[in-house]
Each structure stands twice: as structure tokens, then as C-alpha cells.
Amino acid sequence: MKDKISSASQKVAAAAKARPAETRWSLLGAAGGAILGLLVGGVGITAMGGGAGVPAAVILALVGGVLGNRFGISKDRPVRDRKMD
């Protein structure tokens, strides 16, 4: 079990080093979304006759993380293309 955890953490660290802008912008987007969500409060989600309250920080952190990830990928791509030339 420890070997699997160690192997997974090494893979995550290698991916973060290989794509630094993607990692940085994903984390910044998630943190920014969470902070904005804490300012907003909560939102209600209803479907099929039921409803549940969800903290906006969770939703906005996910959205911010995805947006930051896409932005970071666009920043890493030119760097990778220049290295190949």
C-alpha cells in the first residue's frame, strides 16, 4: 500500500515539474474560486423534486481550477513547442 502511495506521489510530482504553468494556474484558479465562493456563501441545487445546499466555495473552486488548468495548458504549450525546435 505504501508503495502505491509513494508511486502515485512521484507521478504527481513529475507531472507538476513537466507542466509548471498548468500546475500553478490550476492551483491559483482553485484558490481564487474558493475565496470568491466564501464571499458569496452557499447556493441551492434542486433536481427531481429535491434540493440540497452546496457551499459556493466548492463549486467555484472546481470551476476556477478547471479554468486555471486550461489557461496553464495554453501557457505551457508554446514553451514545449519551442523546446522541440
Image (tube, helix red, strand yellow):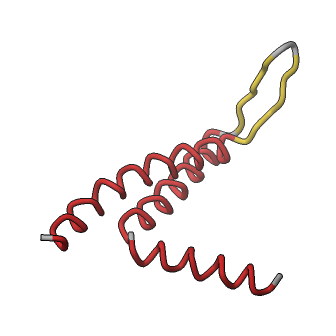
Residue 32 place in picture, x, y as percent: 50, 54
Residue drawn 71% across and 37% down? 42
Q: Quadrant of the N terminus?
A: bottom right
Q: Residue furthest top?
A: 49
Tell me: residue 82, above or below residue 30.
Answer: below
Compared across the picture, whether 84 is left or right of 74 comes to left
Compared across the picture, whether 53 is left or right of 24 comes to right
Q: Residue furthest left?
A: 85
Compared across the picture, whether 78 is left or right of 37 comes to left
Residue drawn 59% across and 52% down? 34
Residue drawn 45% across and 66% down? 23
Q: In this rendered view, identify the residue nearer to me: 53 or 49.
A: 49
Residue 40 place in picture, x, y as percent: 62, 39
Q: Quadrant of the C terminus?
A: bottom left
Q: In this rendered view, identify the residue nearer to me: 27 or 74.
A: 74
Q: Quadrant of residue 7?
A: bottom right
What is the count of numbered marks? 0
Residue 80 place in picture, x, y as percent: 25, 67
Q: In this rendered view, identify the residue nearer to me: 51 or 16.
A: 16
